[in-house]
Image (cartoon, rainbow, N blue to C red):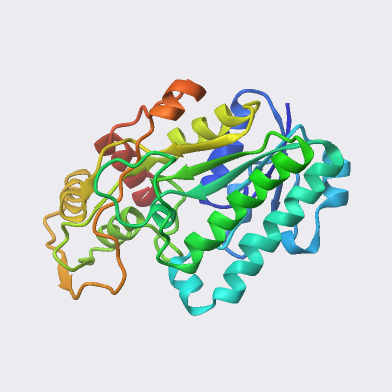
Amino acid sequence: MRAIVTGGAGFIGSHVVEALLARGDEVTVVDDLSNGKRENVPEGVPLVERDLREGLGEVFADARPEVCFHLGAQVDVRVSVDRPTHDASVNVLGTIEVLEAARARETQVVFSSTGGAIYGECDGPVTEEAERRPLAPYGVSKLAGEEYLAAYNRLYGTRHVSLRYGNVYGPRQDPHGEAGVVAIFLGSLAEGRAPRIFGDGLQTRDYVYAGDVARATLAAAGQDGGVFNVGTGSETSVVELYDACRRVAGSSLDAQQAPARLGELERSVLDVSRAERELGWRPEVPLEEGLRLTWESISA
């Protein structure tokens, strides 16, 4: 099929592009390169350097996509707290521009949303029907994007899909940018530095490998709308994660303890049974294997 991937030069977006190319699809990448990297875009794939808020009408007209995988976003929770207006501008207004361009071409949109930042504190694996209690503007802006997709589905009869990702990790995640903890830990170990663990390190997350996330994202294309969690259904504490990172890195460095950060979730884990049932998808890469693949990419 023909596809546009917004944010396709970024971490998760580049894995989606890779998965599309592997099955022979025609791909156009749209990215403003504020966080994405040109070298993440495979040779021969058209790259349109564009801020989503500038509009995408002519890009869609040229590419004639059947599906737009919308991963372009402001994804740093800390930035959303410091600059909530900027966060809302990119994540809400940018998403509306994508929806409007898609409406003109009758293109389905598959939207990358977030699980942990939307659900807030969890007392076990949460389903898609769980109460949404975002703690940061980032979660609010992503939830607003989901609601815009749902409203367009009701208003125009479209079939847009939202995917609530867990804590995604894998190759090409920048350990110095808006990185997740896996990239930070492995990046520090690669440089021989001890990373910091904030608080007691017992806070848990649902870590899901980027390749698995890309497969789920492609599986959502063609669905008749809806919201799906994309994770593993298993939770790992920060202390357990660091121990696993040390094993794959062959390091004996102890982490430094740091004060707990205000507003940080203690527990976040997703129930992925709907994705298994309706998308025919389930995570395949165990945490230790995914960490090994990530370490190999960082230390190469």
106 lies left or right of 298 = right
- Determine the residue located farthest toward the bottom in the rendered image: 82
Q: Quadrant of the N terminus?
A: top right
Q: Position of residue 47 (x, y in %)?
A: 73, 49
**Residue 34 seen in the figure:** yes
Q: Position of residue 65 (x, y in %)?
A: 78, 35
Quarter occupied by residue 141: bottom right
Q: Position of residue 253 (x, y in %)?
A: 13, 60
**198 to 279, vertically: above or below:** below
Given residues 241 and 158, the one toward you in this image is 158
Given residues 131 and 15, the one toward you in this image is 131
106 lies left or right of 166 = right
78 lies left or right of 143 = left
For the point 32% across and 57% down, the residue is 181
**Residue 32 seen in the figure:** no
For the point 57% across and 35% down, the residue is 226
For the point 16% across and 57% down, the residue is 202
Given residues 150 and 102, the one toward you in this image is 150
Q: Position of residue 3 (x, y in %)?
A: 72, 35
For the image, the number of numbered tags is 0
**16 to 94, vertically: above or below:** above
